[in-house]
Image (tube, helix red, strand yellow):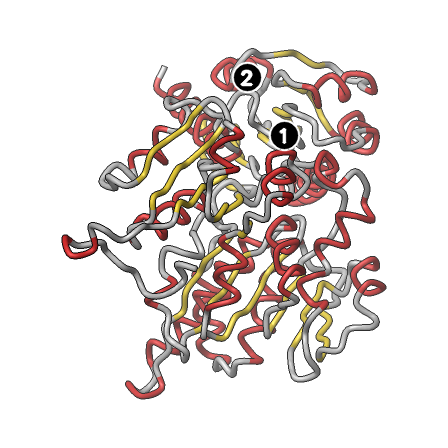
């Protein structure tokens, strides 16, 4: 069903009845756009439905503006669109238990996702990376390590390396360009791993950085979240490889019965970033990337934006963007790492929307390690305030939060954005939150 090479409808096809495809959730992270573009290129009658408004989705809509066969239902969902479609393509962020999907399923309408389509179709060798924290860093570095090797190989041995998935790069945008000899480095969220379970697929090489509580608004418990994550190796075969952070006791326990060849990266002296680098290196070694090329690439690798990233040093303050810390454990890790690394008093900007997570441990660390706290509004912020025993201020938006943080700081302080919460009440996503932090700092420095 529309999973062949792209088909553009021409004049001789005027009488051909093209399937009606519903894209359920356009979003702002690339997946919905990729799905819409994939089916739009094949001439399908595509309808995109999303609860967000046209204004909120502007950046995604701009990428689809040249498709005359795509129409939009925004700011609402209509049951009729679901019940009259030939195929529904679900955004990963939408639960399989969604009531619209239940009604469509009862009528026998097929439902799929970009992940299911890709893993069911791709001829390439796939390496999957997951984890609650650190998967983007590990995936990006691994792709760079592999490109270093295969771009230098003899022409007949060259392999193109693709970095796709949860890293804001749609699985479907490049699917028809990927050749059997290519390698795909796929960053996989827990939502996408739910999809793999439906088709009983796991990557040939699977990497897990860590697992700790997150997305309880979707899963309800750590047990259910873990079940989704472990799909990355659940269907691996004896010749496949599983690489894990051996310092994570939960991971070691969960992977005891894996059928794949298991590799543990175990060194308690390594920082979280160093663990992620070591995981990527191990995957590169399995694919025989030379040590010299590994060393050269790692030396140049400086990490990714929004992950304990130094944005500016201004008036003897260090401003650090850790916007991808979207759960309490990530904040605890950041505070531990940055306290040890810089030995400076910390002004923390935190808060936002809760994902049904517990904030007691995070707040305990804030009480011990933070000089001042500035809170952004949201349901998580309300929970954080219950346990606070330290000074805090509140801000309505990021510009105000940065301004207050600077006013509260002194020479020698570190100002850190590490929210520990979701961003969707104030921002498009966590990356938009990080961008606004960066811009507020630059404006502050110019005032």
Numbered disc 1: secondary structure: loop
Residue 211 position within the rendered picture, expressed as x and y whole percent measured from the top left: 74, 52
Q: Nearer the viewer, residue 359 or 176?
A: 176
232 up-or-down from 90: above or below:
below
Residue 259 disc label: none
Residue 45 position within the rendered picture, expressed as x and y whole percent measured from the top left: 34, 44
Q: Quadrant of residue 183?
A: bottom left
For mark 2, what is the residue?
A: 401
Crowdedness near tag 2: few (<14), some (14–19) or many (≥20) residues, C-alpha within 10 Å: many
For mark 1, what is the residue?
A: 419
Residue 40 position within the rendered picture, expressed as x and y whole percent measured from the top left: 32, 48
Mark 1 or mark 2, which has the lower sequence index? 2
Q: Which residue is pictured at 76% across the width and 65% down the height?
A: 246
Q: Quadrant of residue 407?
A: top right
Is residue 142 left or right of 6 when viewed as pictured? right
Numbered disc 2: secondary structure: helix
Residue 439 position within the rendered picture, expressed as x and y whole percent measured from the top left: 40, 26
Is residue 293 left or right of 265 when viewed as pictured? left
Count of numbered marks: 2
């Amino acid at each position: 069903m529309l999973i062949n090479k792209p088909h553009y409808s021409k004049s001789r096809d005027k009488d051909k009845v093209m399937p009606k495809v519903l894209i359920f959730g356009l979003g702002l992270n690339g997946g919905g756009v990729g799905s819409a573009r994939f089916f739009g290129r094949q001439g399908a009658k595509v309808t995109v439905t999303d609860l967000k408004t046209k204004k909120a989705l502007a950046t995604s809509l701009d990428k689809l503006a040249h498709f005359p066969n795509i129409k939009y239902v925004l700011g609402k969902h209509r049951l009729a669109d679901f019940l009259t479609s030939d195929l529904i393509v679900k955004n990963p962020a939408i639960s399989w238990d969604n009531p619209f999907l239940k009604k469509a399923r009862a009528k026998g309408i097929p439902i799929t996702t970009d992940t299911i389509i890709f893993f069911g179709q791709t001829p390439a060798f796939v390496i999957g990376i997951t984890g609650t924290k650190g998967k983007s860093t590990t995936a990006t570095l691994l792709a760079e390590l592999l490109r270093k090797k295969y771009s230098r190989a003899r022409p007949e041995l060259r392999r193109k390396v693709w970095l796709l998935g949860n890293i804001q790069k749609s699985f479907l945008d490049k699917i028809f360009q990927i050749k059997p000899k290519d390698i795909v480095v796929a960053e996989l969220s827990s939502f996408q791993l739910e999809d793999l379970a439906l088709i009983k697929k796991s990557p040939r090489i699977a990497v897990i950085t860590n697992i700790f509580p997150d997305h309880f608004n979707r899963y309800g418990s750590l047990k259910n979240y873990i079940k989704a994550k472990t799909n990355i190796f659940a269907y691996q075969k004896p010749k496949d490889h599983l690489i894990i952070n051996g310092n994570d006791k939960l991971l070691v326990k969960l992977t005891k019965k894996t059928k794949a060849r298991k590799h543990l990266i175990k060194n308690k002296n390594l920082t979280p970033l160093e663990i992620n680098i070591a995981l990527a290196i191990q995957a590169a070694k399995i694919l025989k990337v030379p040590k010299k090329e590994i060393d050269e690439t790692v030396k140049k690798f400086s990490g990714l934006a929004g992950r304990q990233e130094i944005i500016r040093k201004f008036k003897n303050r260090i401003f650090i963007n850790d916007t991808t810390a979207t759960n309490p454990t990530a904040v605890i890790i950041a505070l531990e790492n940055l306290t040890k690394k810089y030995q400076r008093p910390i002004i923390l900007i935190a808060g936002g929307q809760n994902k049904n997570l517990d904030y007691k441990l995070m707040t305990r660390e804030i009480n011990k390690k933070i000089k001042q706290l500035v809170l952004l509004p949201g349901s998580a912020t309300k929970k954080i305030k219950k346990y606070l025993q330290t000074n805090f201020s509140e801000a309505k938006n990021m510009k105000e939060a940065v301004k207050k943080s600077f006013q509260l700081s002194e020479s020698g302080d570190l100002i850190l954005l590490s929210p520990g919460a979701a961003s969707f009440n104030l921002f498009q996503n966590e990356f938009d939150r990080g961008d606004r932090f960066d811009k507020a700092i630059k404006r502050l420095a110019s005032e």
